[in-house]
């Protein structure tokens, strides 16, 4: 529910500058959400040691997590549209703390499916790209690529901080105490950020200061594309499929990366550091390619990101035969740039196509494809490893997924949202 700006005690601080404060809030929220998701590769190794299951069985915990995230994504979009970003972030903080706390108390392998796979995934879903995309869209009509790029760059910082730090804590106190510590710390952080959220539009020009303040999309023109119209268009399902294959490739790599690096002779902390550094490059990729997308087009920027990611995977495969820091250096640079590029540019593209009051719900439905890809990728990679005894074929499947993603992306910025099928 919108409140009178005059009654907001933080109004003097934010007046006229809130559009960029909103981007900063989103930066920090995504640093928490994606930093924790990136640490799954560290947790994956800890779960392997704790329960002694196969890699496909252990990866199925992550599959349940991402599968649940996918199923609830449309619900998250509805919550954002109806109740606002603040309540969405608060809900995410509560579920995140419950998921981490209850997982730390698990004594049986099946407990992990409930506490880590369901409760934690709900927290991640409410602190993810759907509310962030809706929030940034409210405040930035122009320079969306740059705004989304800055917000999504928080994912890279989160990777850098969470992976080595989580591995360090696990090595010192064990994964259970680590989960409890992270749960309390992250809940307090999300609670504080939630109270900074303003879900109404910018202040009138006479009160805000700048001569050309940002205007929320909802105040410009009509309500935009409706959910039913979007779902009956070809471009909606093209984006859905694109998101599936993109997420399949990214998370087949990220979840298994630390385990792979350990297999070829590196230490756990080194593997966590490499994974974190690849996320840091996402910081630069988000900003640079987000900015470029405003000038050369969303599709071309995303294709460039897929090419970077694919080349990075090639060097990762080569590291199996030439395990040295030089080969991994090229993986970190290329895969990291590609990882950082896909999210903000895609969010800007979705905002371009579906901007309006239903953006949260529409983006939530598209994000169902993301969750399915994230659920399938790690499990298939683990299954292929169990069959072959190596990561060669699993990583080759990632290259195929990126090639399909490039084909789906070509020319997408020229797509029009025109319903192809009649209402039922």
Image: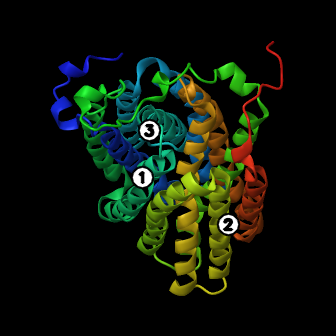
Residue in the image at 53% along x and 39% along y: 117
As measured in the structure, the alpha-carbon distance from the residue carrying label 1 to the one carrying label 3 is 12 Å
Residue 48 in sight here: no
Q: Secondary structure at mark 3?
A: loop
Q: Residues within 10 Å of mark 3 (few under 14, many from 20)?
A: many
Q: Nearer the viewer, mark 1 or mark 3?
A: 3
Pinpoint residue 273: horizontal percent, then vertical percent.
42, 70
Which image quarter holds the C terminus? top right
Residue 286 as seen in the image, left or right of residue 181: right
For residue 163, above or below residue 352: below
Q: Label 3, on which residue? A: 140
Alpha carbons under labels 2 and 1: distance apart: 22 Å
The residue sitting at 74% across, 40% down in the picture is 415
User: Is 179 drawn above or below residue 262 in the view shown?
Assistant: above
Q: Nearer the viewer, mark 2 or mark 1?
A: 1
Q: Report which quarter residue 191 is drawn in.
A: top left
| Residue matched to label 2 | 307
Question: Vertical placement of 281 versus 364: above or below?
Answer: below
Please state which of residues 133 and 194 is positioned toward the viewer in this rendering.
133
The earlier-in-sequence mark between 1 and 3 is 3
């Amino acid at each position: 529910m919108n409140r009178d700006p005059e009654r907001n005690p933080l109004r003097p601080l934010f007046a006229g500058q809130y559009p960029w404060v909103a981007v900063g809030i989103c930066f920090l929220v995504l640093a928490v959400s994606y930093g924790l998701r990136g640490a799954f590769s560290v947790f994956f190794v800890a779960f392997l040691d704790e329960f002694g299951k196969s890699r496909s069985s252990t990866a199925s915990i992550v599959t349940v997590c991402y599968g649940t995230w996918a199923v609830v994504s449309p619900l998250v979009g509805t919550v954002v549209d109806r109740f606002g970003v603040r309540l969405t972030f608060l809900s995410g903080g509560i579920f995140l703390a419950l998921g981490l706390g209850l997982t730390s108390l698990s004594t049986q392998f099946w407990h992990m499916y409930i506490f880590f796979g369901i409760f934690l995934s709900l927290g991640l879903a409410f602190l993810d790209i759907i509310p962030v995309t809706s929030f940034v869209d409210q405040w930035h009509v122009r320079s969306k690529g740059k705004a989304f790029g800055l917000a999504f760059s928080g994912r890279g910082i989160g990777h850098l901080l969470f992976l080595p730090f989580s591995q360090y804590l696990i090595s010192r106190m064990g994964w259970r105490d680590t989960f409890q510590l992270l749960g309390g710390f992250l809940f307090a952080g999300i609670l504080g950020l939630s109270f900074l959220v303003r879900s109404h539009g910018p202040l009138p020009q006479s009160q805000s200061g700048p001569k050309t303040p940002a205007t929320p999309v909802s105040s410009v023109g009509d309500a935009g594309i409706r959910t039913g119209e979007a779902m009956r268009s070809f471009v909606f399902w093209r984006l859905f499929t694109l998101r599936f294959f993109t997420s399949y490739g990214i998370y087949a790599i990220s979840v298994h990366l630390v385990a792979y690096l350990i297999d070829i002779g590196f230490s756990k902390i080194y593997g966590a550091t490499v994974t974190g550094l690849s996320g840091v490059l996402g910081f630069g990729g988000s900003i640079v390619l987000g900015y470029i997308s405003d000038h050369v087009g969303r599709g071309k920027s995303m294709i460039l990101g897929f090419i970077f990611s694919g080349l990075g995977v090639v060097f990762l495969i080569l590291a199996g035969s030439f395990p040295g820091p030089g080969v991994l250096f090229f993986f970190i640079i290329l895969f990291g740039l590609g990882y950082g590029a896909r999210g903000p540019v895609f969010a800007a593209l979705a905002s371009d196509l579906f901007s309006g009051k239903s953006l949260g719900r529409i983006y939530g439905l598209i994000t169902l494809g993301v969750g399915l890809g994230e659920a399938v990728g790690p499990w298939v990679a683990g299954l292929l490893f169990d069959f072959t005894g190596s990561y060669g074929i699993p990583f080759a499947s990632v290259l195929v997924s990126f090639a399909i993603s490039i084909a789906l992306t070509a020319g997408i910025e020229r797509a029009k949202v025109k319903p192809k099928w009649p209402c039922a």
